[in-house]
Amino acid sequence: QVQLVESGGGLVQPGGSLRLSCAVSKLTFSIYDLGWYRQAPGKQRELVASLTTSGNTNYADSVKGRFTISRDNVENTGYLQMNSLKAEDTAVYYCNAIFRGTLHYEYWGRGTQVTVSS
């Protein structure tokens, strides 16, 4: 059974940093695009960052210059480095893996809570 398991969330002060990890199992991670999404209370889930298999990245305007998405296809792990965190970054962060081919496959993790507060 395919699993995406996020870790690295927690409570951090404004201006601090966190590194989220997404451990992927039971799929060929290298052929999947990686995405990080977040959902704050009362808001819709939104794309934070994405990284394609060819290395193209895309970031939400609100996190550009502060967050960096990366992946290790050997370790089957995706990452989201978050720096200069703000209170408005508080949300549950979800990992997403998507394969866009003749068939479409998409998987989600269960999320990890990030709280930015003093």
Image: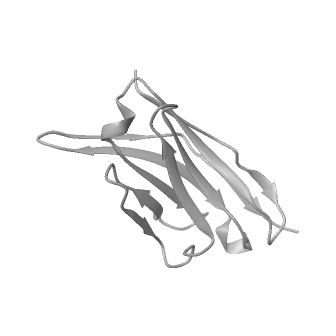
Instruction: Name the colour scheme.
Output: one colour
- Asked whether the viewer can see residue 40, the reply is yes
Between 40 and 62, the one lying in front of the other is 62
Q: Is residue 5 left or right of residue 118?
A: left
Residue furthest out toward the left: 102
Report the label total: 0
Q: Residue 82 at what x, y percent from top left?
A: 66, 62
Residue at the spot x=38%, y=35% of the render?
29
Q: Residue at x 75, y 61 (%)?
A: 17
Q: Position of residue 79 (x, y in %)?
A: 57, 48
- Decide if residue 45 is in sight here: no
Residue 22 lies left or right of residue 88; in this view the side is: left
| Picture quarter with the C terminus | bottom right
Q: Position of residue 1 (x, y in %)?
A: 40, 20
- Residue drawn 58% across the image and 54% down it: 80
Does residue 26 appear left or right of residue 103 in this picture?
A: right
Q: Is residue 62 above or below residue 34?
A: below
Query: Against 106, is 46 above or below?
Result: below
Q: Position of residue 11 (x, y in %)?
A: 80, 55
Q: Residue furthest bottom?
A: 61
**Residue 7's quadrant in the figure?**
top right
Check the image and name the residue furthest to the right.
118
Q: Quadrant of residue 116?
A: bottom right
